[in-house]
Amino acid sequence: MQHILTIYKSRCPALSNTTHHNPGQALAESLLVWLTDGAPMPESGQSKCDGQRPLFEHRVRAAREATGLDTDSVKTLMQSYFSRTSPKQLTSEQVDELIGLIQNLGNHHVGVS
């Protein structure tokens, strides 16, 4: 059986307007050379956010401790509102929202006592 791959447009100049009969290792090597050549990728928003993840846990812990809520209550909030179980899994916007929820729940909790 013969397989033919035709590439009309590609960001990889070596592959634009090419046809490959039974594409295999040669095509893979062309792609690998192109993918590993050149300038490093710019830092993405996600990688910047990854560096802040430990800060997320610290901020959530500080808010929890300031309001007197227990860890299980905060985990329940995260699960209910974001379907997550750790601040590390949240975006910075979600952490801000979670802290607001913690403060709001903590204020009601304090007011009931």
Image (spheres, rainbow, N blue to C red):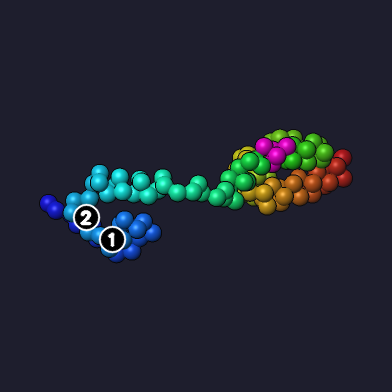
Which residues are drawn in magenta?
Answer: 54-58
| Badge 1 vs badge 2, beta-carbon distance below 8 Å | yes
Three-letter residue code for mark 1: Ile
Secondary structure of the residue carrying numbered label 1: strand
Magenta segment, prevailing SS (helix, strand or loop): helix
Seen at 87% across and 40% down, the residue is 113
Task: Tell me residue 95's x, y (percent).
Answer: 69, 47
8 in magenta: no
Q: Please state the horizontal and vertical placement of residue 84, each as a whole percent of the image.
A: 60, 44
Residue 90 location (% of width, % of height): 63, 46
- The residue pinned by badge 2 equals 20
| Mark 1, residue position | 7
Using the image as rendered, state which of residue 95 and residue 37 is in the foreground. Answer: 37
Q: Residue at x 67, y 49 (%)?
A: 92
The disc, 1 or 2, on the residue closer to the chain's N-terminal end is: 1
Lateral position of residue 24 relative to residue 36, left or right: left
Q: Kindly indicate the quadrant of the structure image that contains residue 18.
A: bottom left
In this view, the residue in front, 52 or 91, is 52
Residue 55 lies in magenta, yes or no?
yes
Amino acid marked by disc 2: His
